[in-house]
Image (tube, helix red, strand yellow):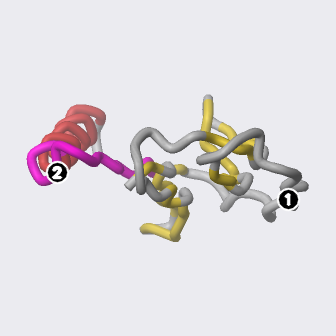
Amino acid sequence: MNFKKMLATAVLAVGSSLTASAAHVNVGIIVATAPPPPLAVDPVGVAPGPGYVWVDGYWDWVGGRWVWVGGHWVLPPRPHAVWVAPYYHPYRGNFHYHRGYWR
């Protein structure tokens, strides 16, 4: 597939996602590499205050490589928000990666 076709497909996919849900956009990235390394286990510890939730560590795709984001405590962006962890799945000989998001 040539570059112009890939760009048009990506723009169409983003546009479709934006119109489907203005509140949430989770566009996958096609990663032409092996899957991420195994997950590490981060110590949880004690929440720094009321209302904080623990977000497990995960591998993120940054600058063409997998980068570990350690588990951490965070205040949700709004009441009752739930963190949806990132996920990866095989897709046409590559890996499709979806970033985590608040639902």
Q: Position of residue 57 (x, y in %)?
A: 73, 52
Vertical side of 9 occupied by 37: above or below: below
Q: Is residue 9 visible?
A: no
CA–CA distance in space, label 2 to label 1: 33 Å
- Judge left or right: residue 80 versus residue 11: right
Name the residue rendered at 9%, 46% in the picture: 19
Name the residue rendered at 27%, 41% in the picture: 6
Q: What span is colored magenta in the figure?
A: 18-30
Name the element at disc 2: loop
Front residue of 69/53: it is 53
Q: Name the chief secondary structure element in magenta.
A: loop
Across the whole image, how many numbered discs are drawn on residues? Answer: 2
Front residue of 57/55: it is 55
Q: Which amino acid, by three-letter code, is at mark 2?
A: Ser
Name the residue rendered at 44%, 39% in the picture: 77
Binning the other alpha carbons within 10 Å of mark 1 as few (below 14), some (14 to 19) or many (20 upward) gives some
Which residue sits furthest front? Answer: 50
Mark 2 sits on what residue?
Answer: 21
Mark 1 sits on what residue?
Answer: 40
Name the residue rendered at 16%, 51% in the picture: 21
Which residue sits furthest left? Answer: 19
- Judge left or right: residue 65 versus residue 23: right
Q: Position of residue 38 (x, y in %)?
A: 80, 64
Q: Which amino acid, by three-letter code, is at mark 1?
A: Ala
